[in-house]
């Protein structure tokens, strides 16, 4: 695995963990909301702020990843296009597919 692939994998893992941990926080807020004596309105507002923050963070991060993925997609599309082009042998002038 290249350093770039490893970095990309770690970035996606961190986003997964961030969302998983936010989900845990939301479940804890819900559990507190179900207990008596806690201000329900305040806890609902907290839940809304956490959800909004998660959405903003995910939007920003996925936009940044989108640019990275677009570059990778173009790179591999070019790679595949080159692999599809026939190669002419200098020895006998025959044309054959690459990799064959």
Image (cartoon, rainbow, N blue to C red):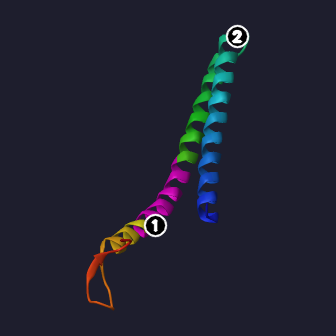
Q: Which residues are magenta?
A: 59-75
Relative side of 44 to 84, left or right: right
Of tags 2 and 1, the one toward the viewer is: 1
Identify the element where label 2 is drawn: loop
Residue at numbered disc 2: 35
Q: Position of residue 100 (x, y in %)?
A: 36, 71
Image quadrant where residue 51 sits: top right
Q: Main secondary structure of the magenta part?
A: helix
Image quadrant where residue 46 sits: top right
In space, the residues marked 2 and 1 are separated at their CA atoms by 50 Å
At x 61%, y 28%, the residue is 47
> 17 or 75, which lies in front?
75
Residue at numbered disc 1: 71
Mark 1 is surrounded, within 10 Å at the Cα level, by few (under 14), some (14 to 19) or many (20 or more) other residues, namely: few
In this rendering, the answer to whether 36 lies above or below 28 is: above
Relative side of 42 to 51, left or right: right
Mark 2 is surrounded, within 10 Å at the Cα level, by few (under 14), some (14 to 19) or many (20 or more) other residues, namely: few
> 81 or 47, which lies in front?
81
Q: Residue furthest bottom?
A: 91
> 38 or 64, which lies in front?
64
Q: Position of residue 99 (x, y in %)?
A: 38, 71
Identify the element where label 1 is drawn: helix
| Sequence order check, earlier mark of 2 and 1 | 2
């Amino acid at each position: 695995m290249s350093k770039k692939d490893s970095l990309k994998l770690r970035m996606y893992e961190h986003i997964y963990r961030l969302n998983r941990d936010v989900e845990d926080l939301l479940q804890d807020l819900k559990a507190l909301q179900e207990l008596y004596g806690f201000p329900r309105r305040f806890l609902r507002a907290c839940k809304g702020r956490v959800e909004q923050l998660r959405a903003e963070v995910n939007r920003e991060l996925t936009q940044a990843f989108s640019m990275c993925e677009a570059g990778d997609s173009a790179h591999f599309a070019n790679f595949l296009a080159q692999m599809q082009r026939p190669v002419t042998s200098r020895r006998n002038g025959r044309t054959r597919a690459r990799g064959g």
